[in-house]
Image (cartoon, rainbow, N blue to C red):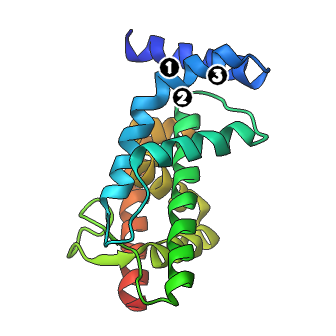
Amino acid sequence: MGPQKEEASLTQLLREARAGDTSAAERAYGLIYRRLHDQARSQLRRQSGPDATLTPTALVHEAWLKLSAADFEINDREHYLAMASAAMRQIVVDAARARMSQKRGGQVVRVTLTDEVLAADAQDVDVVRLEEALQRLEQLDARLARVVQYRYFAGLTEEEIAGLLGVTDRTVRRDWRKARAFLHREIKGAA
């Protein structure tokens, strides 16, 4: 099945699942599972430390359950991937916060932000600081925060992001540069 046919099929299955068709939900999950698992593996690969207990499979299942219970309309495959990345991001942040509170901050969960986000000098920052920086960015410019969400956490292409946001690829590239610079300053200043 080609990417466009898969996207159309997934979009239709997601609509049918939302209407209550459980077999459509299972087929949609089968179509999207590999992409979600890759997203989860990518997010968890950035973590290090002995308390990084989430596995990609557990993260995908928890995100799927979270999205299945949510009350919103899924427009298409990209929209679903964007929502899934937000759910996974929140699960990872919640797990980090829970571990921090258990250890009273003694064992901060670390992630490595490579050149994808912090092109300057690939440094380790903790999940919570990244989340706080993204929240500050969202308050200043919600579109820049969505570009980070879609590109960094969902792994969407510039073209997919442009379609979701209703802007050009060039705008997405410019927003990505601005967002990276902002995150770099925020995280470096918080360290």
Q: Is residue 98 left or right of residue 115?
A: right
Mark 3 or 1, closer to the camera = 3
User: Distance of mark 1 from mark 2, alpha carbons?
Assistant: 6 Å
Q: Is residue 165 visible?
A: no
- Residue at image mark 3: 25
User: Distance of mark 3 from mark 1, alpha carbons?
Assistant: 15 Å
- Residue lying at 45% horizontally and 57% vertically, measured from the top left: 148
Q: Is residue 40 left or right of residue 88?
A: left
- Residue at image mark 2: 77
**Hey, what amino acid is under mark 3?**
Ala
Q: Secondary structure at mark 1?
A: helix
Which label is found at residue 186? none
Q: Nearer the viewer, residue 93 or 169?
A: 93
**Hey, what amino acid is under mark 2?**
Arg
Instruction: Give the vertical position of 91 relative to 70 (above or below).
Output: below
Of callouts 3 and 2, the N-terminal one = 3
Q: Nearer the viewer, residue 184 or 30?
A: 30
Q: Residue 151: x, y in percent?
A: 41, 50
